[in-house]
Image (tube, rainbow, N blue to C red):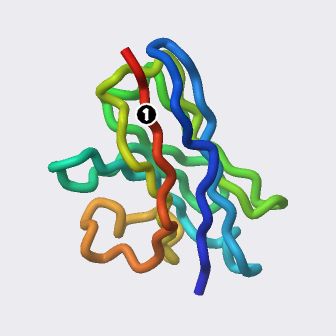
């Protein structure tokens, strides 16, 4: 089992950058895949990016590949989402999630995701 705590969300102007962090408790964090999701008001929660247990394999949705990047440091039990050139449409609550499957297959079927953080608010002003 793993517990997740996100941080780094804040109010930023259009064009700005943020780095979100997701700290996982427990020694098993390094064996879990980590996903980043976001949810805007009135919309469903969507997968933004994911990274496998070792950090050698990453995924990002096509529309965000040029601006977002996921990484992790297992020695610090932390995963990151670097967000650049932010736009008002990026405004959302961002959640990290963990999947004991090493490649995060559960992230593509949200009902299968077992571990969630509490979320961190990102607001991009125009």
For the point 23% across and 47% down, the residue is 41
For the point 68% across and 62% down, the residue is 23
The answer to whether residue 4 is above or below residue 119 is below
For the point 47% across and 51% down, the residue is 50
Is 54 placed left or right of 76 in the picture? Answer: left
The answer to whether residue 62 is above or below residue 103 is above
Disc 1 crowd, CA 10 A, few/some/many (<14, 14-19, 20+): many
For the point 75% across and 52% down, the residue is 73
Counting from the top left corner in percent of width and height, residue 1 is at 59, 87
Counting from the top left corner in percent of width and height, residue 3 is at 60, 77
Q: Residue furthest left?
A: 42
Q: Determine the image quadrant of residue 8.
A: top right
The answer to whether residue 103 is above or below residue 36 is below
Counting from the top left corner in percent of width and height, residue 21 is at 65, 49
Question: Which residue has dot 1 on it?
Answer: 123
15 and 72: which is toward the camera: 15
């Amino acid at each position: 089992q793993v517990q997740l705590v996100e941080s780094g969300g804040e109010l930023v102007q259009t064009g700005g950058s943020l780095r979100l962090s997701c700290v996982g408790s427990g020694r098993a964090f390094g064996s879990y895949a980590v996903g980043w999701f976001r949810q805007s008001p009135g919309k469903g929660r969507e997968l933004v990016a994911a990274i496998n247990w070792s950090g050698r394999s990453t995924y990002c949705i096509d529309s965000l590949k040029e601006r977002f990047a996921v990484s992790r440091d297992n020695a610090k039990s932390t995963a990151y989402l670097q967000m650049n050139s932010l736009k008002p449409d990026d405004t959302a609550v961002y959640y990290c999630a963990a999947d004991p499957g090493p490649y995060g297959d559960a992230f593509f079927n949200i009902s299968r995701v077992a571990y969630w953080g509490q979320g961190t608010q990102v607001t991009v002003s125009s």
